Image (tube, helix red, strand yellow):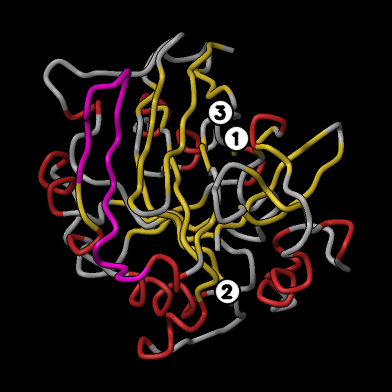
């Protein structure tokens, strides 16, 4: 199933896509859960599908997409997790994942404006696969790690490079308001199928800038769950943003950054496409 968070008629909700993929079944009023994160924590997704399958869906053109998980406890981002990106930046390769954090209030949903801050003209795209945690755990064994995954989504970990590179710490450049695209939905692992076959393609104004399959991740999904759970308890709704392929704008000659009016799309097969238009603010 594909699960999403949204607003319709000034009311927030969450639900799942219909089989046709053109409407969302709003389960909010038919459950004890206020949002998608709490429904994941309650292990309620399958039950809610069974309970609400007969309800009429809301056409997608009537909703405003919210970030897939609107209120994650943690957003753990993985840097330098494709060899091509390590090579183009000259960084990485330490043998353990590079982890930094993004704050929930920096996120935007599918089709929402992505904000190039007025403080800098160096807003860069980073198409990524997002892993959403479904079951809590600490010191999770790699063999058990994927049992803790609720699903996978699409992330654009857009980065203000000027601020990211002022010091050795990434935090400022990764947390400007309106720069973290997350959506349009989460796909459950059973529907994704072969995780290694997921394919990322990032397009800027229709031109392909990044392309890679998940099989090329340096540190795979199970390893990332294992590693992150060594230093923090992972809880339902946590998001692990698993890394961007080569082809980022800052590594090109000349560099390519996003600006007012640009359209940035991140497609992850078979999940879908996350789309945002850039504004300056």
Mark 2 lies on residue: 234
| Most foreground residue, 212 or 194 | 194
Query: Which residue is depicted at the point 68% across and 70% down?
Result: 40
Which mark is in front, 3 or 1?
A: 3
Please state if 277 lies on the left or on the right of 92 as rendered. right
Residue 51 point in image, percent of width and height:
78, 72
SS at circle 2? loop
Is 198 within the magenta?
yes
| Most foreground residue, 138 or 145 | 145
Mark-to-mark CA distance, 2 and 3: 29 Å
Mark 3 lies on residue: 111
Mark-to-mark CA distance, 3 and 1: 9 Å
Please state if 152 lies on the left or on the right of 52 as rendered. left
| Most foreground residue, 269 or 224 | 269
Q: Which residues are magenta?
A: 193-211
Mark-to-mark CA distance, 1 and 2: 23 Å
Q: Count up the numbered dots.
A: 3
> Which numbered tag is attached to residue 216?
none
> Which numbered tag is attached to residue 108?
1
Residue 223 point in image, percent of width and height:
33, 76
């Amino acid at each position: 199933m594909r699960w999403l968070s949204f607003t319709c008629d000034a009311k927030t909700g969450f639900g799942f896509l219909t089989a046709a993929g053109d409407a969302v079944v709003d389960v909010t009023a038919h459950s004890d859960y206020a949002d998608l994160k709490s429904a994941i924590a309650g292990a309620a997704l399958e039950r809610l599908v069974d309970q609400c399958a007969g309800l009429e869906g809301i056409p997608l053109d009537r909703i405003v997409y919210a970030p897939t998980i609107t209120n994650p406890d943690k957003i753990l981002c993985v840097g330098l997790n494709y060899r091509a990106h390590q090579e183009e930046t000259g960084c990485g390769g330490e043998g353990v994942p590079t982890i930094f954090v993004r704050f929930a209030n920096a996120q935007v949903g599918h089709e929402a404006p992505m904000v190039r801050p007025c403080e800098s003209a160096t807003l860069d795209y980073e198409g990524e696969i997002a892993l959403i945690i479904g079951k809590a755990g600490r010191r999770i064994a790699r063999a058990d790690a994927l049992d803790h995954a609720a699903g996978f989504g699409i992330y654009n970990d857009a980065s203000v490079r000027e601020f990211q590179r002022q010091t050795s710490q990434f935090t400022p450049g990764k947390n400007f308001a309106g720069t973290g695209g997350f959506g349009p939905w989460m796909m459950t692992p059973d529907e994704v199928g072969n995780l290694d076959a997921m394919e990322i393609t990032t397009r800027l104004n229709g031109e392909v800038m990044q392309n890679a399959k998940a099989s090329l991740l340096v540190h795979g999904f199970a390893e990332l769950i294992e590693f992150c759970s060594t230093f923090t308890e992972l809880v339902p709704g946590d998001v692990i943003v698993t890394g961007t392929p080569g082809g980022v704008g800052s590594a090109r000659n000349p560099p390519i950054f996003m600006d007012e009016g640009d359209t940035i799309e991140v497609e992850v097969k078979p999940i879908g496409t996350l789309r945002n238009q850039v504004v300056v603010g």
